Image (cartoon, rainbow, N blue to C red):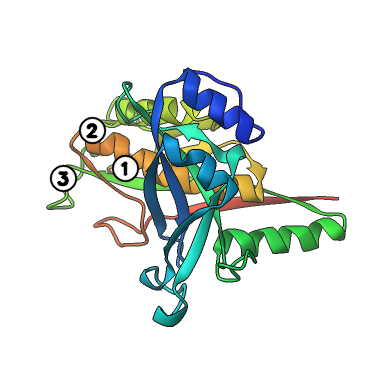
Amino acid sequence: MTYSKPRDQKDVMQLVKDYNVKFVRLWFTDILGQLKSFAIPVEELEVAFSEGMGFDGSSIHGFARIDESDMIARPDPTTFAILPWRPKESQVARMFCDIYEPDGTPYKGDPRYILKLNLEKASKKGFTFYLGPELEFFYFKNDKCTETLDEGGYFDYPLDAAEDLRRDTILALEQMGIKVEYSHHEVAPSQHEIDLRYAEALEMADIVMTYRVAVKEIAKKARSLCYLYAKTSFWRKWKWNAYTSVII
């Protein structure tokens, strides 16, 4: 499935019609970077664009007290993408949201807004900030143990038991318009890496959140478990390398 990256609300509404999208998941993160999401039927999409969708901010870690709980999520149409691991009939898409106060001002605790503010400051000084992360993770046989899938090491082949999992993950990412440079088995057994093509910092932040979901969803389909979090494996800790580039 290939489609042009949407530029505005009109493009999104056309893609929803062309690809029979029935639900749209609205994504944002709490202050700790945990992805949050709720789904709306496409019939509510125009309202989401024009007015935003209200939710209880006091239930989101670090967002608001109970007496100031009302928050508004407004989707960014340029982040629209169809989720390739969801059913092809009555498809599901996602968009990242910016979070607002009820009076329409940006919520100061929204990590996406904070990043935008800092990128704006850099831009005023003549800088453009790019990121190129190397994201590593482990596959385990199931969610009940940390039994590895293989005994492979760095760049090993054919001891690499998860080659197909990485391939399917890359295909899913590419269907969402995310560019991948290469992938390989890492140093420890069952440790893997999929490297992304560098992008501007805000776009890359959205991509990394999508990457985390995609890797886990593809693993779940194969009845394996994937860990991307900062936890110790039997062999070593996972790491994320991020190469930065500041263009003047």
User: What is the spatial separation of the Cα atoms under label 3 and label 1, in whole angstroms?
Assistant: 12 Å
Residue 134, given in percent of the width and then of the height, sits at: 52, 45
Q: Is residue 132 left or right of residue 147?
A: right
- Please give the name of the residue rendered at 55% of the width and 65% of the height, measured from the top-left corner: 110
Q: Amino acid at mark 1?
A: Lys
Disc ID at residue 174: none
Residue 189, given in percent of the width and then of the height, sits at: 28, 44
Q: Nearer the viewer, residue 156 or 209?
A: 209
CA neighbours of label 2 inside 10 A, class few (<14), some (14 to 19), many (20+): few
Residue placed under numbered mark 1 in the picture: 216
Residue 152, given in percent of the width and then of the height, sits at: 29, 37
Residue placed under numbered mark 2 in the picture: 221
Judged by depth in the image, the label closer to the viewer, 3 or 1, is: 1
Residue 207 in sight: no
Query: At numbered mark 1, what does the secondary structure look like: helix, strand or loop?
Result: helix
- Please give the name of the residue rendered at 43% of the width and 81% of the height, measured from the top-left corner: 67
Tag 3 or tag 2, which sits nearer the N-term? 3
User: What is the spatial separation of the Cα atoms under label 1 and label 2, in whole angstroms?
Assistant: 9 Å
Residue placed under numbered mark 3 in the picture: 142
Q: Is residue 207 left or right of residue 127?
A: left
Q: Quadrant of residue 166?
A: top left
Q: Amino acid at mark 2?
A: Lys
